[in-house]
Image: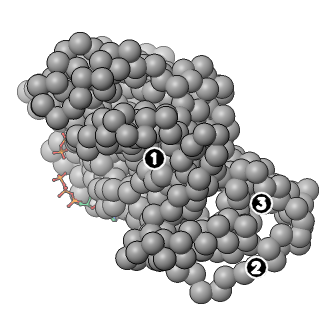
Amino acid sequence: MNNLSMLTDLYEFSMANGYRQTINDEQGVFDIFFRKVPDNGSFVITAGLEQAINSLQNFHFDQSDVDYLRSLNLFQDNFLNDLLDFKFDCQVSAIPEGTPVFPREPLLTIRGPLLQTQLFETLLLNILNHQSLIATKARRITYSAGDRPVMEFGARRAQGPDSATYGARAAVIGGCTSTSNVLAAEKFGIPSAGTMAHAWVESFPDELTSFEKWAQVYPDNAALLVDTYDVLKSGVPNAIKVFKELKAAGHQPVGIRIDSGDISQLSKAARKMLDDAGLPEVKITASNALDEHVVASLLHEGAPLDNFGIGEKLITSASSPVLSGVYKLAAVIKDGQTIPKIKVSASREKLTLPGLKQVYRLYYPGTQNAFADVIALADESLDQPITVVKANPLATQREQRIEKFDAVPLQVQALDGPKLQTTLPGVFDIQKYSQQMLTQIPAATKRLINPDEFPVYVTTKLAALQESLVEDAAENE
Ligand SMILES: Nc1ncnc2c1ncn2[C@@H]1O[C@H](COP(=O)(O)OP(=O)(O)OP(=O)(O)O)[C@@H](O)[C@H]1O
Ligand SMILES: O=P(O)(O)OC[C@H]1O[C@H](OP(=O)(O)OP(=O)(O)O)[C@H](O)[C@@H]1O
Ligand SMILES: O=C(O)c1cccnc1
């Protein structure tokens, strides 16, 4: 990854320079969390931690960066000179990639010199918001597709090269099995996959010739696009001719792709034609502006589809294109003393959770069935029974007693200075872990429409700290 240290909002530099001139000896603790799940879902799949960690480990400023910042005539020399010697000196803990997470949970916590922690806000949010958004969308789509493979086809419609490449990574975390994006495939060890475009078919005098030539070049990888002219009158009959010739020559035909029209009716008719021709092994791929709802509708209608190629709606999360993760100050540390901090704004919904924290997933004892998450202060132990309070400050029913549970902490140490404290698994290991974590949460929280809310609580100690800081803030007004 390039050095992205300058990818930040100007005000981060303005504040960092300001800290350098004022409270330079203080440390900051920031949490990343979100309040709202895209597409009115109930969970987000975390993604992007590896790139976030890499960007922090490589964080530095070149002379040209500092020269540029100097040219703004905004910052003092001591700050600018320090930037040339920037050494990452923070601790990071985070919830591993692929974990299903819920509103208000600290996904990543960073603690270190206030000046440094402030500078990372924009970049960390940019990376984690993007990849988590796409991983979450991919999970919705692959949930609809069931065990049918979903190929990520979005590079041409992604919002720029990075969205295409890191979006493909996130799509695999969310369950996609391959990508047409060769750069992403190479970079992240994802199988590259693809068929052919209409241009191939149009380039030859007729469709049959185009299929034959393809089969000559790729006898063991012939997936034919059958909708350039007429799917049922020419595309499928021509594909059948070519597949029969391939089979006679000892090759295994792969499949057809349908990219327009009523995919349900066309695939049913195509399946029948292929089966009647003795080609039951030939697979049918669907593409064309698919999303989780179209996929669900097609399968509900009984469309005999074997796999999907999905681009624009996935790579841009078109129906819900923003994950509004935020980066909020939870504490400052001064002379070894931790001073919890809170943001109290006009809307109570935006109250932040103060202090150093950990988030736990609670399971019914002795099972893998999770029933709630609890956010606690880092120095608390979760004794049983426990009284907890809804983390959403707008919730009406507040206190709840939980008798028995197994608690598993979700955040792990990720960085101690630039030194890595955890493993960074490959994308398919993350995908597998994610699928396993998803089996642990209730089915009703995973449905696409009107999912149940998974309960997220805070301990009464954390709730009391939050209330006391709200009262302090009111007195200071
Ligand atoms: N049976 C179906 N049920 C629900 N949605 C479908 C069905 N068949 C296709 N779709 C979806 O409907 C949308 C529009 O399909 P339509 O046939 O209008 O494609 P199009 O974009 O006009 O075709 P082309 O790509 O040739 O321009 C696409 O998102 C497609 O995936
Ligand atoms: O629809 P998506 O989910 O993004 O899937 C990828 C699309 O990209 C290709 O189309 P192309 O760019 O050639 O344009 P088209 O829409 O005219 O087929 C392909 O034939 C799919 O339709
Ligand atoms: O290989 C394909 O079929 C493909 C790749 C990208 C976009 N649309 C289709």
**Between tags 2 and 1, which lies in front?**
2
**For disc 1, does the CB lie below 8 Å from ligand 2?**
no
Query: How far separated are the C-alphas under marks 2 and 1?
Result: 30 Å
**Inter-mark Cα distance, 1 to 3:** 23 Å
Instruction: Say which quarter of the image contains residue 345.
Output: bottom left
Residue 345 lies, with reference to residue 192, above or below; the image says below
Q: Amino acid at mark 1?
A: Ser
Mark found first going from the N terminus, 1 or 3: 1
Q: Which residue is mark 2?
A: 400
Quadrant holding the N terminus:
top left
Residue type, mark 3 in image = Leu
**Is 40 or 30 nearer to us in this picture?**
30
Instruction: Tell me which corner region of the image, top left, top right, bottom left or bottom right, holds residue 154.
Output: top left
Q: Secondary structure at mark 3?
A: strand
* Numbered badge on residue 39: none
Give percent across and percent down for residue 70. Answer: 16, 24
Give 251 or 389, whichever is nearer the viewer: 389
The amino acid at mark 2 is Gln
Q: Disc 2 on helix, strand or loop? A: strand
Instruction: Report the disc number at residue 362.
Output: 3
Q: Is residue 226 above or below residue 211?
A: below
Q: Name the residue located 33 percent from the left edge and 56 percent from the top edge.
A: 322
- 114 in relation to 445, above or below: above
| Most foreground residue, 139 or 420 | 420
* Residue wearing tag 1: 132
In this rendering, would 101 be left or right of 271?
Answer: right
Q: Is residue 452 above or below residue 155?
A: below
